[in-house]
């Protein structure tokens, strides 16, 4: 190759140097291009397989490209769709709408990286999202609401009362049979003083005086703990008393037993009427 020399300002430069500086080739042609003429959007600067033209929104980060998956653990727009941490991103969690503000929702969730818009809670088991007193884990109380979302209303309420079975409907309950509830169940009452719940005539303060037991062998109808005889004594005439009753001889009959009972009408001669009669008790 013959290299021509040109004198410029008393300095010798080669035509190769001229080519690099002014774009003139050895053969005299003009390439018309320099390093500054290259479009950066045509270059894959981070080696992720995408250029700016292809939609790479950050060509300095190989984890960011249109082919990447959005990831909740980053703050970048990983998939270059214009949204950072959009729904269904890797690592997302289900968030629910909470209409009543009780911290729980029950509508269809959205999988999000963080609470967004109306989707603000992660608990989705609310049994009534229009009732702020109903949500899982709440304390059940007597208010006609399923507070704890267990599918039952007022069952196991902390402020429930104890009621007692009143099988004979005399208004007095059996201490041995109780129910914990907000309102009395059928055939239950608040009282627990019935001494026998199988006979409506047997209850505290009863005036019944009977010659048959109340149903369990006892004649204690007034629940005072004692079987009291209606006529405990032998007959004795008391003229000043309108009616006097007593037995003609010992032994005095026990409850339900029979004997000859005397009755005197209050006259000066104590007229007596005799009759066979059972002993009544209370």
Image: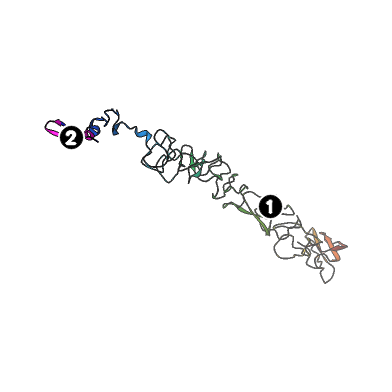
In this view, the residue farthest toward the left is: 10
Residue identified by numbered label 2: 13
Q: Position of residue 76 (x, y in %)?
A: 40, 41
Task: Indicate the quadrant containing the C terminus: top left, top right, bottom left or bottom right.
Answer: bottom right
Task: Determine crowd level at label 2: few under 14, some 14-19, many 20+ residues with C-alpha closer than 10 A.
Answer: few
Q: Give, as a single range, the part of the protein colored magenta.
A: 7-17
Res 157 label: none
Q: Position of residue 157 (x, y in %)?
A: 59, 51
Task: Give the quadrant of residue 225.
Answer: bottom right
Q: Is residue 68 left or right of residue 5?
A: right
Residue identified by numbered label 1: 188
- Front residue of 211 and 235: 211
Task: Indicate the quadrant containing the N terminus: top left, top right, bottom left or bottom right.
Answer: top left
Give the mark nearest the N terminus, 1 or 2: 2
Q: Is residue 7 shown above or below 181?
A: above
- Front residue of 66 and 183: 66
Instruction: Check contact, mark 1 vs mark 2: CB within 8 A.
Output: no
Mark 1 or 2: in front is 2
Q: Is residue 78 shown above or below 229?
A: above
Q: Is residue 250 left or right of residue 34?
A: right
Question: Label 1 to label 2, Cα distance in Å?
Answer: 118 Å
């Amino acid at each position: 190759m013959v290299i021509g020399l040109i004198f410029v300002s008393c300095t010798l430069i080669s035509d190769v140097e001229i080519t690099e500086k002014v774009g003139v080739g050895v053969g005299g042609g003009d390439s018309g291009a320099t390093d500054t003429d290259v479009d950066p959007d045509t270059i894959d600067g981070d080696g992720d397989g995408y250029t700016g033209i292809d939609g790479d929104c950050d060509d300095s980060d190989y984890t960011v490209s249109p082919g990447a998956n959005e990831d909740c653990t980053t703050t970048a727009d990983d998939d270059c769709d214009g949204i950072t941490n959009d729904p269904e991103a890797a690592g997302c969690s289900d968030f629910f709408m909470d209409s009543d503000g009780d911290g729980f929702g029950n509508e269809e969730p959205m999988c999000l990286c963080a609470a967004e818009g109306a989707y603000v809670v992660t608990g989705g088991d609310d049994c009534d999202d229009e009732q702020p007193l109903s949500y899982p884990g709440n304390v059940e109380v007597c208010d006609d609401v399923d507070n704890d979302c267990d599918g039952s209303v007022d069952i196991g309420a902390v402020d429930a009362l104890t009621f007692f079975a009143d099988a004979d409907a005399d208004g007095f309950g059996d201490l041995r049979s109780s129910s914990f509830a907000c309102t009395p169940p059928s055939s239950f009452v608040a009282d627990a003083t019935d001494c026998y719940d199988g006979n409506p005539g047997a209850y505290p303060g009863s005036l019944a005086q009977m010659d048959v037991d109340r149903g369990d062998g006892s004649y204690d109808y007034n629940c005072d703990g004692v079987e009291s005889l209606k006529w405990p004594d032998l007959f004795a005439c008391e003229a000043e008393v309108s009616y006097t009753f007593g037995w003609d001889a010992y032994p005095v009959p026990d409850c339900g037993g029979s004997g000859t009972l005397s009755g005197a009408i209050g006259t000066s001669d104590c007229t007596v009427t005799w009759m066979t009669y059972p002993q009544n008790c209370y």
